[in-house]
Amino acid sequence: MWGIRGAVALADLAHGTSLGGRAPELAGRSVLLWTRDQCAAALALIELDGLARRIVLCPADVDVAHLPQIAADGEVDALVTDRDAAEVGPLGVALRIEAHAAIVPIGRAADGMRRTEWLLLTSGTTGAPKLVCHDVASLTAPIGPGPQRPVWGTFYDIRRYGGLQIFLRAVVGGGSLVLSSAGEPVADHLRRLAACGVTHLSGTPSHWRRALMSPAAHEIAPRYVRLSGEIADQTILDHLRAFYPQASVGHAYASTEAGVGFEVNDGLEGFPASLIGVGGREVDIKIEDGSLRLRSARTASGYVGRGRPALLDDEGFVDTGDMVERRGDRYYFIGRKGGIINVGGQKVHPEEVEAAINRHPDVWASLVRARRNPITGAVVVADVVLKDGPGDPAMSAADAAEAEREILAICRRYLAPHKVPAAIRFVPSLDVAPSGKILRHA
């Protein structure tokens, strides 16, 4: 496991500890794991599974104001952290153990193995995040035989579901994992990935768009490129295939609640209709009212905490809230159930419009949103990042106007009239949430 400070051999944990020799004190406890350092979190996770009753896994960027509620919902009675006492004092947890990004050769007393619950935070945009309950069995259920000695890298934080999947693949598959540090520039991360010989690299489409804008993107040569977490439109898939011709480019559907649903490795957006079905499959998949629903051993067991909604329906399915539509023998993602723009009573999914805009060869990324309108209630507007964007000498005002005309022509070709943006604004960048997804402001 490679961190920004150096390499750690996981095999050393068999006779050592990253918890200062105090791991036995955590036996049977509900442990809040909150560290700045990803490597420290990774080592602590390996030690805590089978020892703690529960691990509440907090990303480094969690809103501190939400920690007391998270701790209450998770029934936390111990804290593993690399933060100073002033930061964690308001939590009021008596047992605090220091996490380290290194292994100290101290034998650990065995306390017997127990089934440890892993509580992951949802990436909700309002209010305290919900806690979703998994265990090692559900988290590793999607992991089958893998490549020989891969060197994994990820743009995700391993304390979120997408990054945790890559961490577990590296651990279970016997490979290596290159971790980033909080706030590390994209170019620096890419150069470390190159120095470590990364072979398998994952992230959201937004992660990949940012990576491809960096000159350091040419320094890596992965054999497998994986996308998940957002809709992978054909444009980003084609960009990656052209940029890394030696790589297999795939995208996976997964969520914190539903787990990994499926992978698509044919180079095309959407997924084959043949994946839909119930019975005799690793993952049962069905569509109800246009929404994708999943049931499998990979699914979380439920939400944890008082007043939490039911996760599974009466048949054990998770309603993902992701909307799809069938065209021919393939299903395509068109957006989120709760993200619809209402234009004069007609529905618009922002992601569908973004996919059309992103077809333009000079567009890196786009964000579609609603703007109030006294006649229709709302109209569609778009923020667009061009490869030669505002402020770049290569992009004149005339070039920008021509790009706008071309983008609107593409939208009119692929979209119904009410979905075509009423206005386009060119911007230098788009805000990206800590989860790696484009930040959609309410």
Image (tube, rainbow, N blue to C red):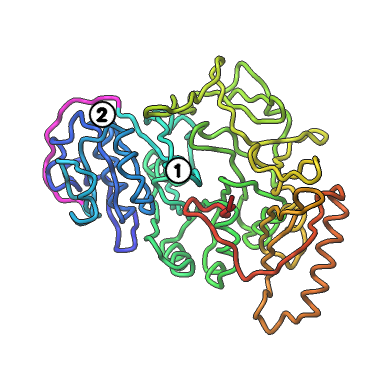
Amino acid beneath label 2: Arg
Q: Is residue 60 left or right of residue 99?
A: right
Q: Residue furthest bottom?
A: 393
Q: Is residue 52 above or below residue 313?
A: below
Q: Quadrant of residue 390?
A: bottom right
Distance of label 2 from label 1 (alpha carbons): 26 Å
The residue pinned by badge 2 equals 53
State the image coordinates of residue 43 (x, y, percent, origin top left): 27, 46
Q: Residues within 10 Å of mark 1 (few under 14, many from 20)?
A: few
Q: Nearer the viewer, mark 2 or mark 1?
A: 1
Amino acid beneath label 1: Gly
Q: SS for tag 2?
A: loop
Give yes or no for residue 104 being in the magenta stretch: yes
Residue 58's disc is none
Give yes or no for residue 62 being in the magenta stretch: no
Q: Nearer the viewer, residue 298 or 124?
A: 124
The residue pinned by badge 1 equals 127
Magenta residues?
103-115
Q: Is residue 203 left or right of residue 109?
A: right
State the image coordinates of residue 114 (x, y, percent, origin top left): 25, 25
Which numbered disc flags the more N-terminal residue, 2 or 1?
2
Q: Residues within 10 Å of mark 2 (few under 14, many from 20)?
A: some
State the image coordinates of residue 181 (x, y, percent, origin top left): 37, 60
Q: Is residue 17 left or right of residue 416?
A: left
Q: Nearer the viewer, residue 298 or 201?
A: 298
Q: Is residue 69 above or below residue 114?
A: below
